[in-house]
Amino acid sequence: MWTWFHKLASPPHFYRIAGLVTPWFAWPALVLILVGLYGGLVLAPVDYQQGEGFRIFYVHVPSAIMSMFVYSTMAISAGIGLIWRMKLAHAVAAASAPIGAWFTACALATGSLWGKPMWGTWWEWDARLTSELILLFLYLGFIALRSSIEDPQRADRAGAVLALVGVINLPIIHYSVVWWNSLHQGSTMFNPGAMAINMKWPALAMLLGFMLYFGAVLFVRLRAEVIRRERNATWLRQELAQ
Amino acid sequence: MNLSDFFYMGGYAAYLWPSYGLVLSVLIYNVWSARRAHREARRAAARRLQMEETRS
C-alpha cells in the first residue's frame, strides 16, 4: 500500500496517471452538466412562489456548494502538505485555488442576479452573503500570497497556513442561515422533503457534474504544477520529447 | 411551451439567462486556462532543459 502510494506520488508516475484519468472525469462531467441544464431549464416544474425565476437555483446552488467543496479540498491537501511535507499535496492546494475562486465568484454573481427579482436588492450585508464574499477573498489572498513568495517551499507553507486558518469560515457560511436572521433562504438541497424529487434531480446531476469537472480541471492544472516543480531532467526530457 | 415562452422565462429572462451564461462561460474559461497553463509549463520546461544543455 505504501509503496504503491509513493509510486503514485512520484512525479513521472503521477503525470502519466493524471493524463490518463482526465478524460474519465471530463466526459461524464459534460454529460451530467448537459443533463442538468436540460432538466433544470425544461423538465423541472415551475416553483409556486418564485415562478420561472427559481431556475437560477440550478446554477447557483451547485456553484455555491462547489465553492466550499473546493476550499475543503484545498485546505485538507494544504494540511497534508504541511504535516507530511508532501509536495504533491501542496500542488493540489495550489491547483485548486483558481477553480474554487471562480466557483465562488459564480455563486456570488448568480446569487445577486437571483436576489434582485426576489428580494429587490442586488446585495445585502447579510451573514450568508458576507461570509461567501470572505471566502472569495480567502481564495484570492491564497493565490496572491503564493505568487508573492519567490521560494516555492516557503510559498507552499505560507499558503497552507492561510488556507487552514480560513477553514473557520466554512461552518460560518454553512450555518449562517441558521445562526443569524438571514435574508437568504435555508438549505433546500440537504433538507429532506424541502424539495420534490422532480425538482431536485437536475440540481444533483449538475452538482455531480461540477465535481467531476473540478476533478478534470484539477488534473490538468496538476500536470502543469508537476512540470513546473520538476528539477529531475531525465524523465522530463523523455516526456517532452514525445 | 413554445420557444419564445422558453426564452421569456416568465419575465425572469433578464436575471436567468445572464446567470446561466456566466456560469457556462466560467466553466469553459477554466478548462481553457488550465490547458494553457499546462502547455506553457511544458514550453518553459523545454526551454529550461535546452539552456542546461547548451551550458554543459
Image: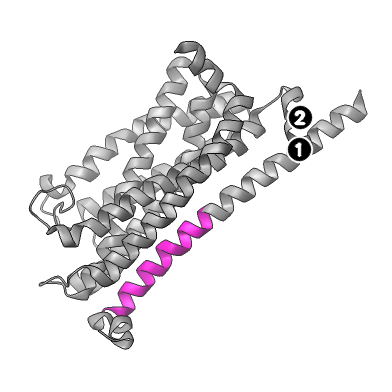
Residue A20 location in percent, x, y?
56, 37
Residue A81 location in percent, x, y?
47, 22
Disc 1 to disc 2: CB gap under 8 Å: yes
The residue that label 1 is drawn on is A242
Residue A42 location in percent, x, y?
27, 72
The residue carrying pointer 2 sits among few (fewer than 14), some (14 to 19) or many (20 or more) residues within 10 Å by Cα, namely few
Amino acid under label 1?
A: Gln
B51, above or below A46, in the image: above
Amino acid under label 2?
A: Gln
A76, above or below B8, in the image: above
Q: Residue at x 15, y 50 (%)?
A: A177
Q: Is residue A91 visible?
A: yes
From the viewer's side, name the closer residue of A179 and A102.
Answer: A102
Task: Quadrant for residue A148, please give it.
Answer: top right
Per the rendered image, the range of residues in magenta is: B12-30
The residue that label 2 is drawn on is A238
The residue carrying pointer 1 sits among few (fewer than 14), some (14 to 19) or many (20 or more) residues within 10 Å by Cα, namely few
Q: Residue at x 76, y 23 (%)?
A: A234
Q: Is residue A232 magenta?
A: no
Q: Is residue A121 visible?
A: no
Q: Secondary structure at mark 2?
A: helix
In this image, B47 relative to A228: left or right? right
Q: Residue at x 28, y 34 (%)?
A: A168
